[in-house]
Image (spheres, rainbow, N blue to C red):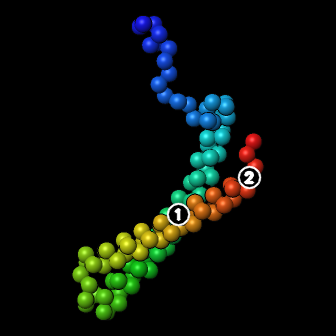
Amino acid sequence: MANKMKNVVIAADSPLERNGLASLDQRLALAKRCSHGAKAAVVATIATAIPTLASARMLPWARANLNHTAQALIISTVAGAAYFIVADKTVLATARRNSFKPVH
């Protein structure tokens, strides 16, 4: 009975590993394609955070009526929204592009 238990496989391989397609080069290429969306999202976050920071700190009304916590909340909300909007658009564009590729 103990010998039979040694041969049991607990973890299932992914389809890529079962077909032998998961080489290191393919994994690196996949990671490179996926990182494009993350880079675009980070750039969008910075591009929106800088003008929002400037306006929250330089506008007389904002300086007079918003404390530092409120200014930080506004800046982080705008930056976070920009990050997720760009990431979502990138994911949707990639899914749309990949949906037309034939499956082998």
In the rendering, at what x and y percent does residue 50 appear?
A: 43, 76
Q: For mark 1, what is the residue?
A: 87
From the image, state whether disc 1 or disc 2 is nearer to you.
2
Look at the numbered disc 2 and give the secondary structure of its residue: loop
Q: Which residue is mark 2?
A: 101
Badge 2, how many Cα within 10 Å: few under 14, some, many 20+?
Answer: few
Q: Is residue 58 left or right of residue 104?
A: left
Q: Is residue 46 visible?
A: no
Give x and y (percent) for residue 61. Answer: 30, 92
Identity of the residue drawn at 67% across and 30% down:
20
Residue 54 spot, x, y in % from top left:
39, 82
Identity, as a three-letter code, of the amino acid under mark 2: Lys
* CA gap, disc 1 and disc 2: 22 Å
- Amino acid type at mark 1: Ala
In the depicted structure, whether residue 37 falls above or below residue 61: above
Q: Is residue 44 above or below residue 31?
A: below
